[in-house]
Amino acid sequence: MSEQNKKTVILLLSCKDQKGLVFNITNFIYKIGGNIIDLDEHVDPVESMFFVRIAFDLESQLFSENELNAQFENLGKQFNANWEIHLEEKMQKVAIFVSKYDHCLQEIFWRQTLNEFNINIELVISNHEDLNRLCEQNNVLFYSFEITKENKLEAEQQQLDLLKQFKIDTVVLARYMQILSPQFVREYPNKIINIHHSFLPAFIGGNPYKQAFNRGVKIIGATSHYVTNELDEGPIIEQDIVRISHNDSLKDLIRKGRDLERFVLARAILLHSQYRILTYGKKTIVF
């Protein structure tokens, strides 16, 4: 098939490990006219679980995303599997939540200009006005909601209404300094990506970098994960660290931590936008 007449399809699947999985799945792709261009699988021997990500090319006029899921349904049920089928070309609609820190948002905007992510940034939502101008400079819609203890649930419902209006697929918390309610999280299971420092569970509370500096830590890090109702304990997508020495000041720690947060969140968004992540319990399989 010519480059102009093909589309790339991504299949993500997990189920109990059993005989015939790869044969039956690849045979299904062959029968619908697909040509496999990438296959990556993993078996967890402890849980006896099978995970796979397959990318295959298909004639453009053959099957929509919904039709492919319908075609695969019988086989998926046969293996009692969880699966997703996506068209690689389909851009995910993303909403970014921020507060006052701008470093993660700046990084996302910059990488978006380089077309690194398979996303469209539809809007930015904040509980402060500070980053409005930055959004204007990048031609992204900005919405602000003042949030207090008294109006938190009402404000969240207004935010959810906005997300539904824009048909948002994924929410990115780019240093959003609010805890989302269970009602909010329920609307986007494994679709909310967060970033935070990796001091947790140590140095809980305000000014963790100062606490870490006073303790003389030798390593600091950042973690990006999916949001669940267990605070900062959702399935981890990406992490990184940097070493600290006695020569580093508190300002150095903050600068290095800020850089890590930017890079780690960007990598997590990239992996998510390329459909490379399967969640299983509190863990992820990242292909």
Image (spheres, rainbow, N blue to C red):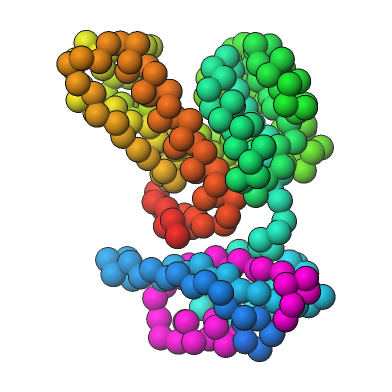
Which one is nearer the viewer's eye here, 122 or 281? 122
Percent position (x, y) of residue 261?
44, 29
Residue 21 vertical placement versus 87 (above, below): below
Residue 214 vertical placement versus 280 (above, below): above
Percent position (x, y) of residue 218?
20, 25
Identify which residue is drawn at 55% across, 65% down: 12
Q: Is residue 157 magenta?
A: no
Residue 176 vertical placement versus 267 (above, below): above
Judge from the rendering whether residue 34 lies leftward or rightward of residue 176; answer left or right. right
Res 126 quadrant in image: top right
Res 151 quadrant in image: top right
Percent position (x, y) of residue 270?
55, 47
Which one is nearer the viewer's eye here, 162 or 285? 285
Does residue 180 appear in this view?
A: no
Identify which residue is drawn at 58% across, 70% down: 55
Judge from the rendering whether residue 37 lies leftward or rightward of residue 166; answer left or right. left
Quadrant of the frame with the N terminus = bottom right
Does residue 167 appear in this view?
A: yes
Quadrant of the frame with the C terminus = bottom left
Magenta region, residue range? 1-28
